[in-house]
Amino acid sequence: MAQSLERPSDDSIDVGALLAEPLLRNTLVAGLAGIHQPVHWCLPLSEMDEPDRGAGPPHSGIVVHAHAARLRGPGGAEAIRAAAGRGAVAVLVQTEPGDVATPSELPFAFPEARRAADEATLPLALLPPTADYRAVSQLVATKVLAQATHVLQYSDRVHRSLGEILARGAGISPLAYGMARMAEAAVMVIDLEGTVLGYEATSATKKLDAAVIIGLLVQHLEQLAADEPATPGVTVLDPVKDGEATCTPIVAPVMYGGEISGLAAVLEPAGGDPHDRAQRRIVAAEGAVLIGSEMLRIRSMTEAEERTRGDFVVGLVHGRFQDGQQLAARARHHGFHIDGRYAVCVAAMTPPDVDDERARRRVTAVVRAAEKMGSTGGPATLATHIGGNLVVAVPVTRPGRASPDALGEQELVRAFAGQLRKLIGERMSTQVHVAFGRVGTGARGVATSYREARTALALGRRVDVPPIAGYDELRIFVALSDLADSENGRTFAQEVLGPLRKVDGHARNLESVVLAYITESGNLNAAARRLGLHRNTTLYKLDRVSRTLGMDIRSADTQFMVWLAHHIDNLVQVNDSLDAELAPPP
């Protein structure tokens, strides 16, 4: 996916540029294919003979200066191969007055060394006798240091220009535009999820379709993630085509906290020269550093706001605002209308692993998307993640619109719950159950609706309900709610179910048999099929139920008693669990 560049990075020169100097001009006799290798320094051939001091080529990027005596005869070929094996990028030979009498003899001198240089693609140049090691090393040092100084000066200019934009706290898009202006090319910034944080270009630059570029950038991000913990640098990717237009992404990873958080890509148009590319590499590298700082600032502010909003939602749904003035002040800040009509939707989601940064970001993204999905003007939709559930307080009124009746309100909430379930399925690649409570007014209505939504969600794990269920749709449980809270109701459930559970122990085998029998409206064969038991086995267990209860289970009254006790018991367990969770802190 990434191109193998023929030219060195922006902070070095290559052998070809070095050989263009007057002292070294027209001296190359072999190894033409290697002239694009980067040059870092110059050493005499004698130092190349020192023992290795570590893994890898010990003299990578080094130009070797040698006397003609070392290159004569078969030993010259061996010296060339040894220099190539130790990472040398060129061999510059200082000839003696008798080695090359005329320029026409130059290509024929030192034949063994020339053949070895061509085989190793190692440039070999025959210098005049005046080109001693001092003159050559001074020339290399001057060229390398001048190039490094030029790069540092341009890097500093880019950094200062982008730093002024960063200091204003304007955001990522202005930083991307500043990069685009200096690079004279479009600039795109994406995060780890492939979301475009900024795509900017000047009026003189054409922007390609973002979708064409994002796929390549996301693929490169995945490759960087697989290559960690290595610290990545600037990379030139394969060209991208959009119709007749072509661009080459020059990308740098956006990092903070030692982790990759996205990519900054300078989209180089076709026809750029090496100097332009070198400058664009610098723009990409410096811009990625400052974009990382801006992303960290934005993330810190966003997380602080999300924590504050999350705390407010937790206080709302748990009914913990005892001070009306405190509620009013925080409500104004978060866009909550204390006289508005709200319902609460709760979606059962698996809590993210605290060590999985990507999973936590996905959950956070779902929370933000849920808020944006409901906030189309008017009161804000508030969402947060509580335990293993996504909790959303949904406003059902809008300014300037007539308030819907109770049935219309529930239909609005149901539609939102369906959209929420679809959103979670798309973002998290999983299907969840969503429950919602009835619409209420203000903070008290939110707390009541939340409890109802949690009740409906918990009952959905015990009885068969649709994936999207409202509390008022579980009518039998709504009707039984007062009975489940009473002492008489709890006693009744215990007296009916207690004997069955005492006989069964923890297995509750008899209870499941009688419930299957009741569900199938007293049809013995259907109950046996539901349970996967033989008909006679099912009949035996039902007879045992009758003996345990002291009543005939075939009687409709007895079946109703067991059915009612079972529903009351489910509701009691759900209410007790919620009471323990929603109780105010000591």
Image: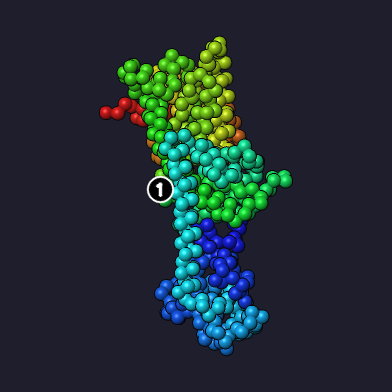
- The amino acid beneath tag 1 is Gly
- Residue positioned most to the left: 586
Depicted 409 relative to depicted 507: above or below? above
Residue in the image at 33% along x and 17% along y: 325
Depicted 264 relative to depicted 229: above or below? above
- How many numbered markers are drawn? 1
Residue in the image at 54% along x and 35% along y: 424
| Residue 516 visible in the snapshot | no
Give the image location of residue 574, x and y in percent.
42, 29
Is the N terminus in the top left, top right, bottom left or bottom right quadrant? bottom right
The residue that mark 1 highlights is 257
Give the image location of residue 215, x and y in percent.
61, 47
Give the image location of residue 165, x and y in percent.
46, 38
Is the C terminus in the top left, top right, bottom left or bottom right quadrant? top left
Depicted 533 relative to depicted 270: above or below? above
Depicted 501 relative to depicted 147: above or below? above
- Residue 47: image quadrant is bottom left
On screen, residue 244 versus residue 369, left or right, reads right
Q: Nearer the viewer, residue 325 or 551?
A: 325
Residue in the image at 52% along x and 24% along y: 375
| Residue 256 visible in the snapshot | yes
- Residue positioned most to the bottom: 73
Residue in the image at 40% along x and 22% along y: 333
Q: Nearer the viewer, residue 70 or 178?
A: 70
